[in-house]
Amino acid sequence: MSRLLVVSAGLAVTLLRVSTAGAQVSPRGFAVNRLEPSERGSEWFTTESLDFRGHFRPALGVVGDYQYRPLSIYDKDGKVVADLVKHQFTMNAGASFVLLERLRLGLNLPVLLYNQGEAGLLKGIRYEGPTSDQGVGDLRFSLDVRLVGAYRDAFTLGVGASLWVPTGSRQDYASDGAVRVAPRLLVAGNPGIFAYALKAGFTHHAGDGKPFGEETTGGGTDAFAAASAGVRFLGDTGLVGPEVSTSSSVDGFFARRTTPVEALLGSHVTFGAFRWGLGVGGGLTRGYGSPTSRVLFNVEWSPAIVLDRDKDGVDDLADACPDAAGPRRDDPAQNGCADRDSDGILDKDDACMNAQGVRTNDIRTNGCPADRDGDGVHDSDDACPDVPGRETRDPKTTGCPATREREPERDSDGDGVLDKEDACLDIPGQKASDPNTNGCPDADRDKDGILNAQDACPDEPGRADADPKRSGCPKATVTDGAITLVEPIKFKTASAVLEQDRGTQDALEGVIAVLRGHPEIKALEVQGHTDNRGGAAANKRLSQERAASVVKWLQAHGLVIELKASGKGQESPVDTNATDEGRTHNRRVEFLVSPQKSPPKQP
């Protein structure tokens, strides 16, 4: 009996030692999900859009997060030996509160709806899978402050911190088992249709950092970073783009297993007070917590907020003039913009916003009343609207040339018009039946209906043009043995068919006008040129066909001189073929006058 007691006691001690030894090496898990969802109210999954609008504005929502194989054991050949966590589906319930457009409070609670894995051996140590299929993760509290910029600015800066309370279970790979705190720097921007966001900081773990696979997890300090970039669509209500996030243990900085890197493509669309999002991606490394694939979705609600700085009833996001009140308009470029003088030129572009005027290409005169003689005195006030003068207080003389005491029988400027009849005493001019212009310079020397002051070619008749550098100039001129065109001749894409646009017609008519004005030109070579896209032989053929089309058009419109069509293909570029603009210049038609029949060079 005594021997039995001794044997039993020895067996109990042995079992206790085995049990104790097993407990000492039995590893504990950690929070395997390394992707921390953004605060509710963000248009990204991993970063912050820093929307701090509102004096007390809540946002409520959920972020669904499914991971496939976030924690697996691999053999030396990279084959999966065991999936400690194979499937993990988490629903992140959260809320945020923006205060005074400057401060934001946030909270997030991960709820594990499905958490499944299996046991496996890693470096001789047995690791168990999750003990429960359902559970919760660590509750997160956040506080962020906006420092610089505002929502949708090109650059917005904020700082903040998050605190995790260990409400989850390490055995379920849902918690680090200790308090964590993470200071962070936040950047966001929205230049035009593009948007970006950056997040960086470090996480300090109060846990003891038990080893997992000989690397520390659940303790110490991690550095983390995330970046997002995207493009807005659906009238600025949608945002789509890639997001990348990573973290690394400071104890083993950039070690392969403790540096998970993930990338995903996400999209969010906002309809009124609701925002919907979907993202797909996966791990770029095999670090702990880097899943083979991940699917995210979110649904959230936040009161729609309308900013209207100029109080005109048009939301700043739709207001083309957000700082100057104006009516609602159908044209997005004019919506919310004022036009006080109702001349069709918005106040923001109108140099004379209180007086009806005409549109010009000069910001100093755009929207101002017409000034035909270009003397700075509007026609409505100018006593001599067709003669340059100076502004005076006398409405009878303002805008007229300077006057002095007239000597009736004298011709002070020597133009043949006596002072008593000369409207421009000190400026040589010409006789005219109009007493207001008699003795003044000809306001339209080339008689093309465009006054000299607005005529870019005052001595050559031409047509009016919206471009002040071309207005009043002929559409074609003879220079250095060639006919130079103001407008290029255009063809339909990859075709020899002439375009029927106004510019092409003007150019062709300009060629005829020049040739009829120079009867000494008896022969003309029409050369076609292309850019370098396509085969050389095909380009040669196309350029020949285009030159022949021009010759055919000229002949059909009565030109009877000798005409030769030549296709040069891509042989003689005048600009680079590396840009669209350069290729446009290279696609051209040139008109060369035969040397022996060239007119004398124009002065």
Image (cartoon, rainbow, N blue to C red):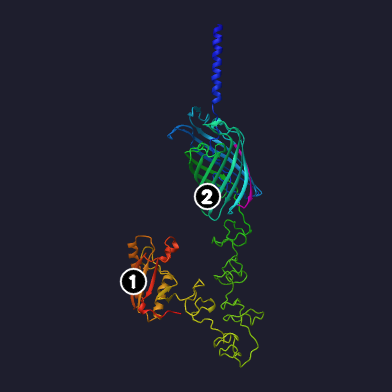
Image side of residue 520 versus residue 339, left or right: left
Q: Could you say where residue 170 lies in the image, as x and y percent from the top left?
A: 56, 31
What amino acid is at disc 1? Ala
Q: Mark 2 points at which residue?
A: 229
Q: How crowded is mark 1: few (under 14 residues within 10 Å), some or many (20 or more)?
A: many
Give the residue pinned by disc 1: 565
Asked whether residue 192 appears in the rendered view, the answer is: yes
Q: In this view, does 9 lie above or below 152?
A: above
Q: Position of residue 108 (x, y in %)?
A: 59, 39
- Start-end of magenta stretch: 139-150
**Of callouts 1 and 2, the N-terminal one:** 2
Q: Does the magenta stretch include residue 32?
A: no
Residue 548 visible: no
Q: Which of marks 1 and 2 is in front?
A: 1
Q: Where is residue 484 in the image (x, y as percent from the top left)?
A: 42, 73
Amino acid type of the residue that numbered disc 2 sits on in the rendered structure: Ala
Residue 141 belongs to magenta span: yes
Secondary structure predominantly adopted by residues drawn in magenta: strand
Q: Nearer the viewer, residue 176 or 193?
A: 176
Crowding near the residue tagged with mark 2, few <14, some 14–19, many ≥20 C-alpha atoms within 10 Å: many
Residue at 47% in and 38% down: 292
Is 526 drawn above or below residue 274 in the view shown?
below
Q: Find the distance from the CA under tag 1 to the CA under tag 2.
A: 53 Å
**Viewer-proximal residue among 39 and 234:** 39
